[in-house]
Amino acid sequence: MTQAERDRLVALKKAKKKLITQREAAEELGITERHVRRLLRELKRRGDKAVVHALRGLPSNRKIGAEREQEAVAILSRPVYRGLGPTLASEYLPNKHGMEVNRETVRQWMMEAKLWRARKQRVEKIHGSAASLLSGP
């Protein structure tokens, strides 16, 4: 439970014990009185979990399955696709394999599978030798 949720719980419990009014609790929390009443009903029904979002800890409905990720990484691991960046790879996947995936998702998958490295992680090539730099013009 986050600190903001604990603060919300304290204000709701004060309102439940009639130490402050529902209006004061609403002002303290920055919500409407009606929402305070709804939260108090939930507090009675679910306990302290009422202030925590019910979907916390559950996977997103938009999450792409692990098997689809493995399939895409297997495709991108082929020698034909070696050297492709995430933008071009994300264009090839729907056209050639019927797999519609966002470019950023492909980038994350490629970095995780060590198929691609972000630009700032690449080793910079030094042009010229150290001897030519020291001797000068």
Image: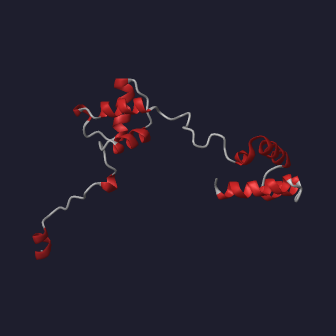
Figure quadrant of residue 69: top left
| Residue 111, image x, y percentages | 35, 45
User: Vertically, is 74 above or below 109?
Assistant: above
Specify whether 104 is left or right of 54: left
Task: Tell me how many marks there are.
Answer: 0
Quarter of the picture holding the C terminus: bottom left
Residue under the point 80% across and 44% down: 44
Residue in the foreground of this view, choosing between 81 and 129 = 81
The answer to whether residue 89 is seen in the rendering is: yes
Residue under the point 74% across and 55% down: 8
Residue under the point 40% across and 29% down: 67
User: Vertically, is 83 above or below 15?
Assistant: above
Residue under the point 31% across and 31% down: 74
| Residue 37, image x, y percentages | 84, 45
| Residue 18, image x, y percentages | 89, 55
| Residue 109, image x, y percentages | 38, 40
Residue in the foreground of this view, choosing between 88 and 63 = 63
Specify whether 130 is left or right of 33: left
The answer to whether residue 136 is seen in the rendering is: no
Specify whether 54 is left or right of 79: right
